Each structure stands twice: as structure tokens, then as C-alpha cells.
Amino acid sequence: MTSTLSSQLERNPLLAEWTDPQGIPPFETIAPEDYRPAFDTALERQKAEIAALIEQPASPTFANTIEGLERSGAALKRVGGVFFNLAGSHTNDAMQAVEREMAPVLAKHRNAIFMNDALFRRVDELYAARQDLGLNAEQSRVLDRYHTIFVRAGARLDSSGKKRLAAITERLASLGTQFSQNVLADEKSYRLVLDGEPDLTGLPPFLRESAARAAADAGMPGKYVITLSRSSIEPFLQFSQRRDLREQAFKAWTARGDSGGATDNKAIIAEMIALRAERARLLGYGTFADFKLADTMAKTPDAVLALLNEVWAPARARAMVERDDLQRYAERKGEAITIEPWDWRYYAEHVRLERHDLDESVIKTYFQLDRIIDAAFETAGRLFGLRFEELKDFPRYHPDIRAWRVMDAGGAVVGTFIGDYFARSSKRSGAWMSAFRSQEKLAGDIRPIIVNVMNFAKGGEGEPALLSFDDARTLFHEFGHALHGLLSNVTYPLLAGTSVSTDFVELPSQLFEHWLSQPDILRRYATHYRTGEPIPEPLLQRLMAARNFNQGFATVEYLSSALVDIALHQRKDPTSLDVAAFEKDALASIGMPREIVMRHRTPHFTHVFSGDGYSSGYYSYLWSEVLDADAFTAFEETGDAFDPATASKLKQFIYSAGNLRDPAEAYTAFRGKLPTPDALLAKRGLLAPVTE
């Protein structure tokens, strides 16, 4: 290495020592051109670490092989943790170029590790002798997980099989990156411009204010803009009296990735489905769904479909009753229409107002973002003894982000929590949790740095951001994930935090949502943004009574996406996939109501096609909901939603345990048994008669 290059690398803020007391990366000093050199250096470091591990003359031991693997790649985790978080939450053209460059490079690097014959021989030798190694339970779990990872990565294939599998995974990495960038491009490019009162008819003040701000940001002061951010498009569909504009916006929303132009994702999907199927066959599985689910709680596609189909029938029946209610409402108002997908949210809002006397524009005045953040912190404090101290002086990648030092009841630091709450054009849509640094003890007492990313609309000038009840539930959901990362208490990084199967990872998040609906939480934190008065008791009671309103629609919208996901990945037909026709036929086969569209249509289904995370796995939310509905029942059975003994077990076996145990064992350790879907059906109101 030349002295000039060495000096440049030393000055690279991604590789230099980070001086923030919490270990937060020095975001303000990182430039897009720093990423590629930092990645290259980090990759070379891990290659050298792996080579030294393989070339050591000593026979394999847990310490010199498995712990060696766990210690390797620290620089790569550090650089990747910064880059991939910002690639989702605050990207730009330069970063997207790096993302496209690095996707196949990183896949190739991973293949070189997990397909390495010499390295696998060491791991395999340890695995064969695992009963005689004197390992503790956590070490045994780490060894088992590494052996599984190697085998599923192709370590047992012959050289030609490895070569082909490596090419497949590298190509899939590139395709997944392009897929997500195409969706973001479509989201960024669309604006529905509203000009004057006729275009604004029906829109409440909070939506007008956010639309005016979006227009100003787009250089159109005096006008109003609706974007494809869910916090913009959904309330527009809910309130706009302009049916023509609702149709226009809805069709743009559902057509992301399906434009027929440069950002169309259908060819990418067809290639990904074919490559995934080939990958599964190489590894000895009949379909990609068989391969993917073998390492989950569900285990098989049949188990997944049994659950999805059990819920589908009552959900569809309820949705049809809801549709008829909407149609009758429109007819009573003298509106000669047939309910279409762009009408559902609008008429559902009116039926809800009529039936439950609930006006979303009124409800939002009681749900201030800052108060709901405080409510989530209060809940975490009452359940797990956590305290949150806001940081004022810390590195920021955007002026809007906030951070808190998280401490336990004794004042010891647990970790750092970052909140990135507002929509912007540099951020992909949706809401998620991630980590800039995960907890571990192997390399010292490493405290996690966890981030929640949302896409809420900002408040007007001098006004707080106001949330819908669904927005507030999303905040609690993602904070449940954050707690899973923050409370992690394991030695080995492979097992830390949310590193569990996809159909178990949603348990901590979905379970945490239950506490938002606790009356004492709402009475304290749902306060009017101007008067400070608590939500009126009659309104609170009506809000709770209407929790299952429109649940048929919501369940059908979700289940249809999960069923199409599984159908795509059970496909064995070697001919080229016509994505649009397949989606249409799959929906027809389940009797998809014409008036409802999948929550995530295939061309913008980022859960499934931006990477492998939720491929064949979108069912996971429902699988975990079976668990969370039953888990909250454990608290209800005590008569105290914050019962200390139950909360202690929940923390021990779920929130702090990472992947120490098989998911079924972990849940049984908490609850004493595995659940049935009954609690889920009751929670969603799908056990009740379908007439109202």
C-alpha cells in the first residue's frame, strides 16, 4: 500500500476512530466517495482474517474456529451498518451507484467464506463432535447456526454446483438492489398537484398543511402536493371528495414498479423467481418456498398455507359484508356508483363516522408524535425498567433525527436509540427498525445503537406532527423491534437482537402494539395538541369499540399479498414468468374481492424482492400474530397489562434472548405452550358473526 493511499484511508471517517461517547457514526463528515474505499479495505481485512483462521496449524476448536468467525469482519459490519441504513433512509444518486456496485461484490465475498471447503471442514468437524466439546447452551446454538448457514449457502455442493450457486446469489443481489431503487424512483417522481379549493374538497386541515409543505419543498408554493408516501396518499384516499383524483392517485400508488418504462420491475421479478427456484434445486429442495421455510418456525409451505387459508375464509366473508355496507351508504347518499378500490377508504371513513361517531381528523388532534413517543417509552419503562434520556449534541445524518441514551432501572447504559420519523424524498417508503451496531459480549460489552425509521408527515409551521391511530400503532410496532435490539443480552453477535427467523421476529413488535390500546396509556398520552386536555372518555371508548372496524378489508389486503408470495415461490414451471398474469390468476384462484387490491402488489413488493429477507416469508406477520395475540393473553390472565412477573419472563425468553433458543422453545419457555390461531381470530374480530 502506498503512503498516499494509507494516509487517505486513515482519514476516511468510516475507518477512523469514532469519538462520539455513544459510538454514533460521524455522519456529518462522511461523503459518498468514502464508502467504496472503506468497503474495499474492510473486505480485505476480513479476507485476511478468514485466511489466517483457515491456515492455522491447530486442530479446530470452538474458540479458534467459531469464535474466529464471530470476530472476523468487524470493519465490514461497521461500514455496512452505516451505508445500508443510509441507503434506505437518506440516499442520493452517488450512494445508489455505490449500492449497485457493492451488491454483487458483497455477495461474492459472502460466497467465498461460506463455500470455502477448508473452512467448512473445520466447522463440520466441530459439529460432528458437538456433544463432546463441553459447550454451554449458547455456544452449542452458535455452532448449530453456523453449520446450518454453511450448508444452506452451498458448502456441501461440488465445485460446479458452487460456481453456479455463487453466480446466482451475486445476480440476485444486483437484481434486488435494482428492484428497490426502481420503486424508490417511482415514489420520488410522482406528484399529484392540487390547485385551488375544488381540488381540496374534503381534505382536513392536517392534510392540507402537509400537502402545502410538500408543494413548497417541490418548488410550487401556493399549491398542494400529494405524494406516494403512505402518510400522504392514504389520508388523501380517505378524505378527498374528488373521486376522479382519488382514482388517479390510487392507480399511481398501485402501479409503482409497473410502469412499463425504465423502472418497471416485472422482468426483474421473473428473473429472480427463476434464479431462486434454481438455487433451491441446487440445494436439494423442490421449490424455493421449501428451501426458505425449512429454516423457519413454520418449516413447510403446507404449514403456512394451513394458517393463511384458515384466516382467509372468515376475512373474505367479513370484507364482503363491509363492501356491502359501503355500497349501501353510497346509495343512501344518492351516489350512483359501484364501489371501486379507490373508493374503499373514503366510504369506510364515512361509515365509521356514522356507526362509531369517529372522525379521523378529530382523532388525530389527540395523537401528537412526541406524546406517542413518550407513551412508548413509558410502556418500556413499566414493562422492562428502561429510562430514556434525550441527547442534544450527537452526529446526525439529517437534521430531523433524534437520539436517546437508554438506561436500565439502576442507571446502567443499555444502548442508544435513534428516531428518524418524517417522510422525505431521500427515504424509501414504509417503516422499519435497524441497527448501526448490535449488542454482543465477545468483543467486550458492546452496547447496541438501534434506529427506527418512519414516514410520518410533519406538522404545519409551529405545529406538532399529528398521527392517525394506525400511525401510532406503527410507531409502537417498530419500537417493539427496537426493544428487541436494545434489550439483547447475548455473548455472540450471530445470535443478537433480531437475528431470529422471520416468522418469530415480528412477535416482539406486534406484541408491543397491544399496550398502545391500554386505556391508562391513552388517557395519559392522547392529549389535544392545543389544549393539552386528555382524550375525552366517550371518544376513547368509541375508539376502542371500533378497533376491529374494517378488519375484513385489512386482513384480505394483507393475506392476498402473503398468498401470492407463497404461490410465486412454489412455482416449478421452467418457462418464463408472466408476472402480471400470474398475479391475476393467483388472486382469482383465492376469490380476491374486486374492490380490494393487495397491500403490496408484486411489482413493488419490496419485502419480497429487495432481498431475500421476506421472500416466501410475508406470511410471517400473521404467524407472529398468532403468537402475540396469545402472549398478551398471558398478561390479561393476571388482570394487569404490566404484570411484573409476566413482563420479567417476556424479557428473559423473548426480548433479551435473541436467537439463544429455537423459536418454539423460546415461546414455550415464556408461555408454557404453543398457541392456536383462535386468539388471533378473536383479536381481529373474525370469530364474530359477519353481519353487523
Image (spheres, rainbow, N blue to C red):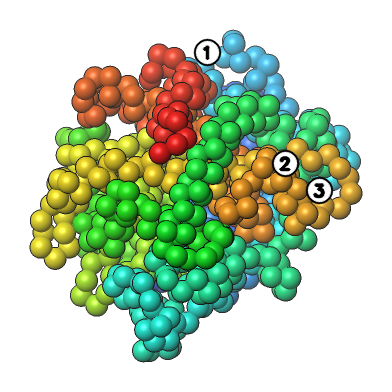
> Is residue 85 in view?
no
> What residue do we see at 54% from left, 58% from top?
339
**Relative vertical location of residue 58 with respect to residue 509 in this rendering, above or below:** above
> What residue do we see at 63% from left, 70% from top?
97
Label 2 belongs to which residue? 589
> What residue do we see at 55% from left, 48% from top?
557
Label 1 belongs to which residue? 134
Q: Marks 1 and 2: which is nearer the front?
A: 2
Label 3 belongs to which residue? 274
Residue sitting at the far top: 132
**Relative vertical location of residue 382 with respect to residue 451 in this rendering, above or below:** above
**Disc 2 residue crowd, few under 14, some 14–19, many 20+, Cα 10 Å:** few
The residue type indicated by label 3 comes to Ala
The residue type indicated by label 1 comes to Gly
Return the residue nearer the eye: 80 or 312: 312
Return the residue nearer the eye: 323 or 123: 323
How much space separates mark 2 and mark 3, taking CA atoms? 22 Å
